[in-house]
Amino acid sequence: MHAFDVLGDPVRRRILELLADGEQAAGTVSEVIRAEFGISPPAVSQHLRVLRESGFVTVRPDGTRRLYAVEAAPLQEIDIWLERFRQFWSQRLDALATELVRGKRERREQRDNGANTAGTPDRRQEPKSVSEEDT
């Protein structure tokens, strides 16, 4: 099965997300997946089997439990394949980062300028005439 066929299923993607936090018992994974997707324990087991047979996860026995963990190699292969497409979003993300920095700088400058002039009179106003001060 091709890597994208494996990852094309939302249940299997979610299982990988759970396992990305560290090794998990099959029962723990099954409980979360059943709660979120409403599928039966045998269906969860089938998804775990697909992930195991395709090399995305490893399993090791621990007494009566089976502990699953992410296997990095298939994910690295996908990352290598995606590398040629990164240019399409990297440039946009770089531009977004530049705009965010620019916006923060402008807000900071506005805030600093506002704080510096808070105690000084507004020089754009005309000074009061002597007759206005007397009234």
Image: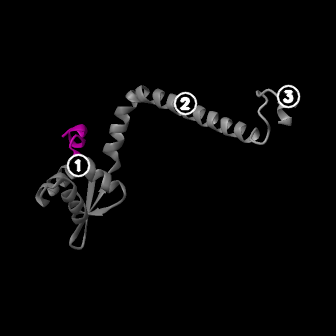
Residue 62 tag number: none
Gap between marks 2 and 1 measured at Cα = 36 Å
User: Which badge, 3 or 1, comes first in the chain's sequence?
Assistant: 1
Task: Tell me the amino acid under the disc marked 1.
Answer: Arg
Q: Residue 110 location, x and y as percent?
A: 66, 35
Q: Residue at x 77, y 28 (%)?
A: 125
Q: Residue 106 location, x and y as percent?
A: 63, 33
Q: What secondary structure is found at the residue carrying circle 2?
A: helix
Count neighbours of disc 3 (C-alpha within 10 A) and say few if under 14, some if 14 to 19, many if 20 or more.
few
Q: Residue at x 36, y 59 (%)?
A: 22
Residue 99 tag number: 2
User: Which badge, 3 or 2, comes first in the chain's sequence?
Assistant: 2
On screen, residue 64 versus residue 84, left or right, reads left
Query: Which stretch appears magenta?
Result: 1-12
Inspect the magenta stretch and tell me whether residue 20 lies in it: no
Residue 129 tag number: 3
